[in-house]
Structures are given as structure tokens and as C-alpha cells.
Amino acid sequence: MLALQGDVREHLAALEHAGAGARPVRRPEELAAVDGIVLPGGESTTMSRLLESFELLEPLRDRIADGLPAYGSCAGMILLARQVLDGRPDQRQLDALDVVVRRNAFGRQVDSFEGDLDFAGLDDGPVHAVFIRAPWVEKAGDGVEILARVPDTAGAGDAAARIVAIRQGPVLATAFHPELTGDERVHRLFVGMVHETM
Ligand code: GLN
């Protein structure tokens, strides 16, 4: 669990419930010892800055490029993307997902937004998704699997049918925060992805 900023505690609890031995990562030695990494929700520009000052940006990018499973929620999704729109010019990317994300995309209409989403591969009904100043995926490359979109309902406006959950090989990302709702299915999916690589 990347523990520089953001809702680290909620993710740690969700990972423990999902059966993982989760621990915080703040130093390169700690990063070297994990079999998977979760990037929390929070503020991507702050996390980007802290990744640089804790000398974790390059090691994290390298480990993910070497196949380390990674899961990012919200700000974590932004960091994993290859490109961000409406970001800060000095914000850095981990280049782990062949997607262009738009930061604070929902914020142009409402700051927060909740809804039930069909999530490909998850049984037992839709996922209740909480979006908080969330990004969406504006463009996804051919190798990116689309797992969930905002429902295309009349009230969804600009957000209708936007991509909000994706997977590319061992990298998973959601624009929303499953760590806040007590539904551990997304964390279980990720823990399963980590086990597949071990
Ligand atoms: N808007 C935040 C960012 O740019 C993300 C919000 C969140 O993680 N809840 O990083």
C-alpha cells in the first residue's frame, strides 16, 4: 500500500478483509519487498510530488513495468495513466496504463456522484460506486479492458457511459472508491491478480 498521502487506512482495512497481508510502503526498500501495490485515492498532484521527494517515482515505475501488479483508485488511477488532462503541468505519470484520464472530470458538474455500476467479472450484482472529485478515462488503448462505465441514463449528463474501471494485464484502476463502501469485491479481484503472479 503506497502510504504517502490519501485514504491509506481504508485501503489497508479492505485489503486485510480481502485476505492480503497489507503493509504501508514509504521507502524504496519497502517497495522492493511487496508482491503488489495499491495506490490510494487522495490528491494526485501531491502524491506525485511526494513520490519524487521520497525517491519512489522511478523505482515504482520500474517495478510496475517489470510486471508488479498495481491497483489505483481515483488519484491512484490518475498516477497510473500514461497521460492526464486538466492536471498540473509538473505532475508526473507512472505510465502503467495506456489511457488518457481527465482529472476532476465529474467536478465540472458536481463534486461527488454515486451510482450502481455493472462491473465486468464481478458476481453478485452491481458495485455501488462513490466518486469524489473523480477522473474518468477519456481514451483507452486497444490493450485496455473496460470493466465498468457510468450508466447511460438521462440524468448522467456528460458522465453518461464514461469509462470508470479498467484493467491492463496486472494493472487495475477504478475512478471510484471501493475502499469506502465495505464492498471488498474489487480488492478481492486485485488480491487474486497478485496471487496469479506469485
Ligand atoms: N481530484 C483528485 C486528484 O486530482 C482525485 C480525487 C480522489 O482521489 N478522490 O488527484
Image (cartoon, grey):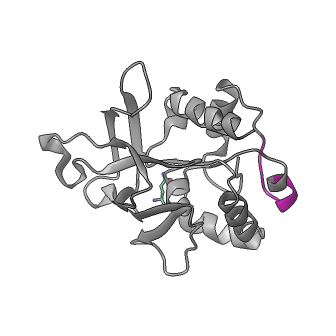
Q: Position of residue 172 (x, y in %)?
A: 53, 47
Quarter where residue 21 is shown: top right
Q: Residue furthest left?
A: 154
Q: Is residue 75 left or right of residue 148?
A: right
Q: Residue furthest right?
A: 29
Residue located 56% across and 32% down the image? 189
Q: Residue furthest bottom?
A: 89
Query: Quick one: quadrant of the C terminus?
Result: top right
**Which one is nearer the viewer's eye here, 42 or 122?**
122
Residue located 50% across and 26% down the image? 183
Residue located 70% across and 57% down the image? 4
108 over 2 or under it: above or below: below
52 over 39 or under it: above or below: below
**Which one is nearer the viewer's eye here, 176 or 126?**
126
Boundaries of the magenta span: 23-30
Q: What is the chief secondary structure element of the magenta stretch?
A: loop
Q: Residue furthest front?
A: 142
Q: Position of residue 83 (x, y in %)?
A: 46, 70
Q: How many marks?
A: 0
Residue located 43% across and 30% down the image? 121
12 inside magenta stretch: no
